[in-house]
Amino acid sequence: MRYRVTKKGVDWVLEKAIELKKYSHYIMEDVISHISVATAIARGKFNKGDRVALWMENGLLYARSGDGDVTGGTISAAEEGEDIGVTDLKGLIKFPPVSITICKVPRVERGGSRSVDLKDLRRQAKDKPYIAAIGVEALIALRKISIEPTILFGARESVVEAAFHGLSSLVVSVDEEVPSLLNRLEAEGLNYEVVDLSK
């Protein structure tokens, strides 16, 4: 059996090679380099070489004395509340299940925040530690239920980072911005739910 190289085949190989190069760069630069020394917030006073237990809370890594699912050794001394480097990590940090809820609100030409079901918005916002607003209409709708968003600018990237740190999010967005947000979440393989808040 004989094979012939085609332009389509070469383009496919090049595309996959570029993806593989990007992935390997990510592993080398972002994953491995960050695993060698993890930065945590000290919950106690530590000396260099102390054994500590690590855990995640509200998207941040903490270190305390004692045993835990994840342990390591400190690389320097630190006081309570200071940043501390931890190396020689053993174990796997557990993240809670992450949920991302996107609430669509209409543009101002279609009523803006005046056309938002505020009761439903309040229900959706309950127990969400990270709240983002995209658009002035979204910001005002949140303010009408006495919530100031965690993030207003750069919300798309911020929600992705929050998810990678184990934080569930509520994104209140003007409807025309929702498709690009969904594309970004899908590109990262993140699950989401979309709720239309128009009344």
Image: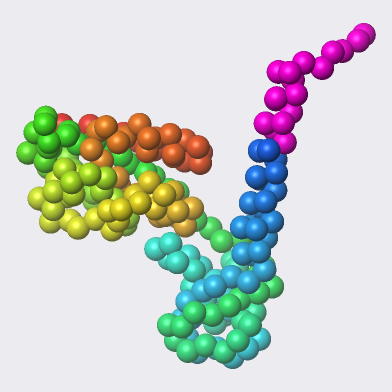
Residue displayed at 26% across by 41% down: 173
Q: Quadrant of residue 176?
A: top left
User: Which is more toward the observer, 125 or 85?
Assistant: 85
* Side of 6 relative to 103 (left or right): right
Q: Main secondary structure of the magenta part?
A: helix
Q: How far across and how far down the image is residue 153, in percent? A: 30, 53
Q: Does the segment drawn in magenta span residue 91?
A: no
The stretch drawn in magenta includes residue 15: yes
- Quadrant of the rendered structure where residue 103 is? top left
Q: Where residue 81 sits: x, y (%)?
A: 43, 82
Q: Position of residue 21 (x, y in %)?
A: 70, 44
Q: Residue furthest front?
A: 7
Q: Is residue 149 visible?
A: yes
In the shown orientation, is residue 45 left or right of residue 69?
left
Above or below, 152 against 86 in this view is above
Magenta residues, start to end = 1-17
